[in-house]
Structures are given as structure tokens and as C-alpha cells.
Amino acid sequence: MTQIAASPGPDGPRRRALITGASEGLGRVFATKLAHAGYRCVAVARNEARLRELIDEMPVGDHEWMVADLGTTDGLERCATRLSEEHFDLLVNNAGFSRFGLFHESTAAEQEQMLDVDCRAVLLLAHAFLAVARPGDALINLSSVTSFLPTPIQPTYCAAKAFIASLSESLWYQQRSRDVYVQGLCPGATRTRFIERAGDVRMKFLLDAISQSPEAVVDASLRALARRRRPIVVPGLRNRLLVLATKLLPRRALVLASGRAGDLA
Ligand SMILES: NC(=O)c1ccc[n+]([C@@H]2O[C@H](COP(=O)([O-])OP(=O)(O)OC[C@H]3O[C@@H](n4cnc5c(N)ncnc54)[C@H](OP(=O)(O)O)[C@@H]3O)[C@@H](O)[C@H]2O)c1
């Protein structure tokens, strides 16, 4: 398991982490691994039953769950208030979702909801956390390889993740002088229920064949967290080669290929 310091000393207070979207998928793996590394975790999501189950499975250690819909003003404000009023050593800004389909056939409200959770919540929670951050603290924002190469089947999601990657890089630079580490984590397809929830089961079969385990993604993020050097973390060789290709090939050809792959799936 990746070694990440969770306590400043044998008798020092244990570090605290708040993880959004912790009821399943990558957030759940983050919460579990951080708890095993000695962090006291606050796990945030909407599904209370799954959060309770997660806390029961964690090593004993004063963990908490918080039911909050980060797409609502109330849920977002309650979470931001906790980050402002209590000290957390680490925020994992992970909650997010996508909806596959044609932009013009969806409702504007559906697209706006995606922006609320994938961008607005990430931005406001990052702000609440960084406003009171102390030297040594860290922020991990979940972006995606789609921030380098849009997959046209999910236009708003890709644009949101590009926003998160860019925001994370600039914050990484700004926060260095405070010794606060910011990471933009850019996974490729990962074996969680994300794609199924996005609404395309056929796509899931294709992506399952090339996807990484959530454990491998979280391990890559936590290794980079231990080193505190890289603003953008792309887990897995296949994903790093894809990102390299986006820098070498013409943009039009890339978007055409990515769009056609989505159409065929
Ligand atoms: N899986 C992939 O292929 C992939 C690739 C690149 C990036 N990512 C990113 O990684 C992050 C985690 O994705 P995942 O694969 O773990 O997806 P997932 O398995 O669908 O889990 C998403 C998590 O976000 C929470 N969530 C969704 N909407 C929420 C809301 N309105 N308020 C609070 N929590 C909410 C869900 O909990 P509740 O339903 O209980 O609220 C769940 O815990 C996302 O930001 C995603 O964009 C995923």
C-alpha cells in the first residue's frame, strides 16, 4: 500500500480528510485507503445507506458520514461550512457525474445540474478549503483524460473536466508558496458504475476492456500526494500515451476519432 503520512508524530493529532462522492467508486476507494493510512475521514454523498456501510467497513477510527447533495445550495453550503469552520488536512473533491447523449435533445436543466456538481461544487469547496488551509495540507480535484481530448458523447462533462484541470494547475502554482499541494487527477476509463450511470450500457462493455481498477487510480494519486510535486496526475501508461497523442496529432482528427468511437459504442 502507498505510504502517506497520516500523523505528524506518535502522539500528534491524526490527520483529517473530507472526501466527496465517497458512497461508491473512486471516492469510496479514496476513503478506505485514507482510513487505512490513519486519516480520520468525513465521507460525503447523497446515499446514506452506502455511506453507513462504508464507515462500518473502515478500520475503527472516528470516521463520519455526511449526507449532502452537492448539486443543491443547501448541500453545498453545509459542506463548504464544515471545510471553513473545521480544519481538514486533505480535501478530495471527487463527486461528479456525466450524461451521455445529444446536447440539443437533453434539457438545459440537466446540463446545468452537471455543471453544478462537476464545476460549481468543486470550485466552491476548493475555495472554502484553501481559504483556511495550513502548510502541509493538500487538495485533490478529480478531472479526467477527457480534459485533454473531448469525447463528444458527453460535451458538458468534458468541458467541466477541462475547467477542473486548468483550475488545478493554476492553484498548484499559487499554493506552492503556502506549502499547500494541489493535484488535478485525470483518470481514463475506470471500472466503477460511472459509465452505467451516465446512461450507456453498450459503451460500458467497450470501456470495461480498456479500463483501470479504481484501486490503481487511487494508488497513483496517493503516490503523487506523498511526493507533492506534480500538478496533473494521469494514472496508467495507456492514458499517458493518449495524452501524449493529443499533443502530437491534429485536433480535428482527434475529435473526429473520439466522436466516431463514441458513435460506434
Ligand atoms: N469512472 C471513470 O471512468 C472516470 C474517469 C475519469 C474521471 N472520473 C471522475 O471521478 C469521479 C468519481 O467517479 P466514479 O467513477 O467513482 O463515479 P461513481 O462510481 O458514479 O461515483 C460517483 C460518486 O459521486 C457521488 N455524487 C454524484 N452526484 C452527487 C451529488 N449531486 N452530490 C453528492 N455526491 C454526488 C455519488 O454518490 P451518491 O449517488 O450517493 O450521491 C458517488 O459516490 C468523478 O468526478 C468522475 O467524473 C471517473
Image (tube, grey):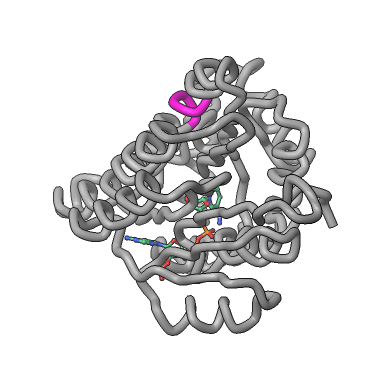
Quadrant of residue 148 within the rendered picture? top right
Classify residue 35 as left or right of residue 52.
right
Classify residue 229 as left or right of residue 144.
right
Measuring 39% from the left and 48% from the top, which residue is drawn there? 83
Say which quadrant the N terminus sits in.
bottom right
Residue closer to the observer: 246 or 172: 172
Q: Which residue is most to the left? A: 108
195 up-or-down from 112: above or below: below
Q: Position of residue 53 (x, y in %)?
A: 54, 83
Residue closer to the observer: 150 or 121: 121
Classify residue 118 as left or right of residue 175.
left
Residue 168 in magenta? yes
Residue 9 in magenta? no
Q: Position of residue 197 (x, y in %)?
A: 42, 67
Measuring 23% from the left and 48% from the top, which residue is drawn there? 111
The part of the chain drawn in magenta is 165-169
Quadrant of residue 30 within the rendered picture? bottom right
Quadrant of residue 14 within the rendered picture? bottom right
Q: Which residue is most to the front? A: 11
Q: Position of residue 77 (x, y in %)?
A: 24, 52
